[in-house]
Amino acid sequence: MGQSAYITLVQGSAVDRIDLDGVKEQLRQYKEQMSLAGRQLGWDYADAAFPYDIKQKPEANGAWFYLKGANSLYRHIVFGTGIREDGEASSSYIQVVLPDDSTHGDKAKANELCKWIGKRLQAEVKLFNGRTLYFNPRK
């Protein structure tokens, strides 16, 4: 079984709920931001920063999608969403999965994407190594 990281929307996050379309939009914004950085630098940085294509399999039934690597350094990363119930409270989350045959490049890019999405959504991010990053305003 692969490794998982979680981006959890908590109290104080920018949004309360997120679905797969919201995650895809975050990834599109990431690619667009990298494209703008590349224009400033004078080279096509978007393809180097996001070397994936967003793919949806019919058997996923809208529960997950994956990023397919564009070269041999990157294979795939799987994204899914869900809602975790804690008693009376519930929190929406994004699960990022590295399948067993993922590369080190996939893991590094998945960590980068988790941090970037977590920061934009002001969420709590639990990385693949078990560390938790808090991007949400806490008291």
Image: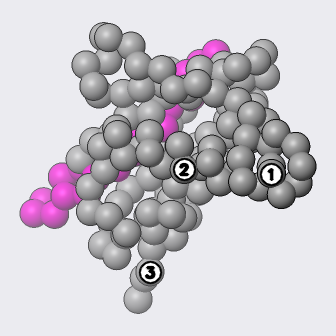
Amino acid carrying label 2: it is: Gln
Magenta span main SS: strand
Numbered circle sitting on residue 29: 2
Q: Position of residue 22 (x, y in %)?
A: 36, 46
Q: Secondary structure at mark 3?
A: loop
Going from the N terminus, do you reach mark 3 or mark 1 first? 1
- Mark 3 or 2: the one toward you: 2
Q: Which residues are magenta?
A: 84-101
Q: Secondary structure at mark 1?
A: helix
Q: On screen, 79 above or below 121?
A: above
Along the viewing direction, whichever of 139 and 81 lies nearer the viewer: 81
How is this picture coloured?
one colour
Q: Is residue 97 magenta?
A: yes
Q: Is residue 88 left or right of residue 81?
A: left
Q: Position of residue 43 (x, y in %)?
A: 88, 43
Q: Judge the density around disc 1: few (<14), some (14-19), many (≥20) Cα neighbours within 10 Å.
A: few
